Amino acid sequence: MESLGEAGIQALRLLLTGDPALWTIIGISFSVSLRAILIAAPVALLTAFALAYARFPGRRLLVALFNTALSIPAVVVGLTLYMLLSRAGPLGDWRLLFTQDAMIIGQILLSFPILVAMGHAAFQATDRRAWETALTLGASPWQALLTLIHEIRFGLMAALLAGFGRIIAEVGSSMMVGGNILNHTRNIPTAIALETSKGSFAQGIALGLVLLLLALILNLALLTLQGRGEVTA
Amino acid sequence: MNEGGIIRRAALLLATLLPLLWTAPSPAGQVVRMATTTSTQNSGLLERLLPPFTNATGIEVQVIAVGTGKALKMARDGDVDLVMVHAPRAERAFVDGGYGIDRRGFMENDFLLVGPASDPAGVAGARSAVDAMKRIARSHSRFVSRGDDSGTHKKERLLWTRAGTEPGGDWYLEAGQGMGRVLQMASELGAYTLTDRGTWLAHQAELDLAPLYAGGSLLANPYGIIAVNPARHPDARYREARRLIDWICGSRAQSIIRDYRVKGEPLFRPTCAD
Amino acid sequence: MNDAGPVLAVTGLGFSRSGRPVLRELDLALDAGRITLLTGHNGSGKSTLLRILAGLLPPDRGRWHIDGTPGSSWQEVRRSLLQRHCYLHQQPYLFDATVFDNIAYGLRRRRVPRREIAERVARALRHVSLEPLRDRPARALSGGEQQRVAIARAWVLRPRLMLLDEPVANMDKPARRRSIDLINRLAEHGIAVVVTSHDPQHGELRIRRHLHLYQGELSERRLRTEAASASH
């Protein structure tokens, strides 16, 4: 069996030589997961805001449900979606099975509970005075919401990163509804699963390191976006 | 306070990421979708076999590799246009049930029994595959089973039935994993297992196992390719599927299959001419 | 400033929380340029009344006249209240931004031109003597300074009515005097001011009227404080 060090060297070589097959896989991974998070985030954050600020019956139950949904395995989401999207299933006519769109739907479903749960926690930690202050200074509810988002931007950024982290690395749903089709629905995690089943562990680890490296770059990019993130008393 | 600033910066970041959102090539020309088994994909043959077909016909083949049972279920549900598996009985049932047509047996390889080089059960000296299974059962030597209802697992069940034993007990381990993982487990545990030759050749070098028994018609592993019945699924891409089947039984593809080597050893025997 | 009619008049104002009446059919009129002291023990509903007058909390009932104009729906009343009145929390909430950005907040939301914002914020900063702190993170300021930023942030919007919840509680003497001085100047600018307190000590605050909230009802009180401050 190849050593880990060998795998690391192979990972670097793969990245540096600009292996086109690898970059296609990386491209698919990020394209799918970014689109998923971009669609999921606005709806999820509005939901989180409503759960934190609105008073309606069943609100606490809903929060509990979203927290529970955090522990749904990706495979179960994938399987459920598969059964819906299969030609034999109720949504078969949409012809979405084994497409990137199906992967995106799966990843939206997977990231949504994280975004809501973490977003809810962030909104709940806000001071109610912030909302009232914005309104009394003449902000519209929509402007006040933007202000609130700005006040808790670090918490929301953390929620986005956690959501993105889950879906960029999930294999269960993507494998099931994407089908791991070369050049179409093969992303980094399903490629790792494939390499592992082939016994090419070094290749699998190499892909894992690639994922790690790109996640690191993304995190650093967001860090600079946050600007001075120091705590102000 | 200026949310404008953070939104502008987010937009900037988004703009730099935007190219990533459209990297995936959309299928330009004709496409046909084929379900096959993980071991078929892992053999590496398809990467040699399919690009010449695409070059010749302009039809792109999208391969989805899953277990045998799931591959056939996908074909039955019309989620793919054709299926390439190695489970003759299940294939026959699939065709007889009216789900598929135009089945061709286009190549075969074989299964072999592997185990620790010390061979405590004496499998190497067996007179037949069935005899080898009897020896393992009699000596209660450890055996790792796929246990996943795959083609290989079905073959193993058949051998046990022929040997007149119902395996069970401490020595019989059902892994529920793919062939590669099962070979690794057998190697770690010093156990016997039944494997297809393709996976064996790919993993052989890193395993502490020896090939102990091979040969005989019972251990043959014939591959079939079947088109989804357009009468049952009118929107299946039957014409493209049919062209792929015909091409695979053509002289060009058959010689690619004959010449294909894994770690220097031939793996498949083309059978369309049989 | 127009000192003629009341800035705000409301009659029959009622509000209850979980079935318990907090405000019972109050009548209230507030005049421009006057400071009204609102007292009452803790939990008597002072903050609730202030929030309703600011448009932050919908009452159950009430007929409104805002600058002499009768309001019809709460929706409409709420919009005018939010635009004309400013509410300050006992401990004002400052946004996670600079002093300048905090004071400019309301002006930006009203789409005031950039140059005018700079001028008005500069004037407000001068008004509360905080010019040197213009670019400091607002949350790094002391409690008294934060209070003044909050007053400047409201004052810059030229509100008709300012509602201050316990503005001088928990402050040391110098900070307290500065705040009281500022509040007096708000009234001089023609702004109607309501100040709540559960403490009868108001020092130099030029109170023109004293209302007491007890068991959901308002009563007019004589101005003991005026006599007290006059004797100094």
Image: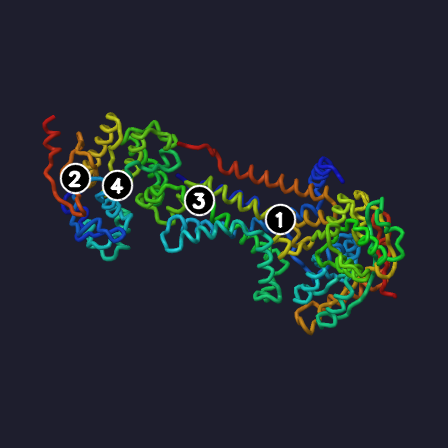
Give the image location of residue B236, x and y in percent: 68, 68
Q: SS of the residue at dot 4?
A: loop
Residue of label 3: A121
Give the image location of residue B79, x and y in percent: 66, 64
Residue B32, compared with residue C43, is above or below; it is below
Q: Sequence-wise, which precedes: disc 2 or disc 4?
A: 2
Q: Which residue does the image show at 76% across and 44% down from the upper left?
A: B189
Q: CA distance from mark 4 to mark 3?
A: 36 Å
Q: Is residue A82 left or right of residue A46?
A: right
**Which quarter of the picture shows residue A200?**
top right
* Proximity of marks 1 and 3: CB atoms separated by less than 8 Å: no
Q: CA distance from mark 4 to mark 1?
A: 53 Å
Residue B66, compared with residue C189, is above or below; it is below
Q: Sequence-wise, which precedes: disc 1 or disc 3?
A: 1
Give the image location of residue C63, x and y in percent: 19, 54
Q: CA distance from mark 1 to mark 2?
A: 65 Å
Whether discs 4 and 1 lie on one chain: the answer is no
Give the amino acid type for the residue marked by disc 2 in the picture. Arg
Residue of label 1: A29
Give the amino acid type for the residue marked by disc 1 in the picture. Ser
Residue of label 2: C34
Residue of label 4: C158
Q: Which residue does the image show at 37% across and 51% down from the upper left?
A: A54
Q: Which mark is residue A221?
A: none
Location of the C terminus of chain A by quadrant is top left
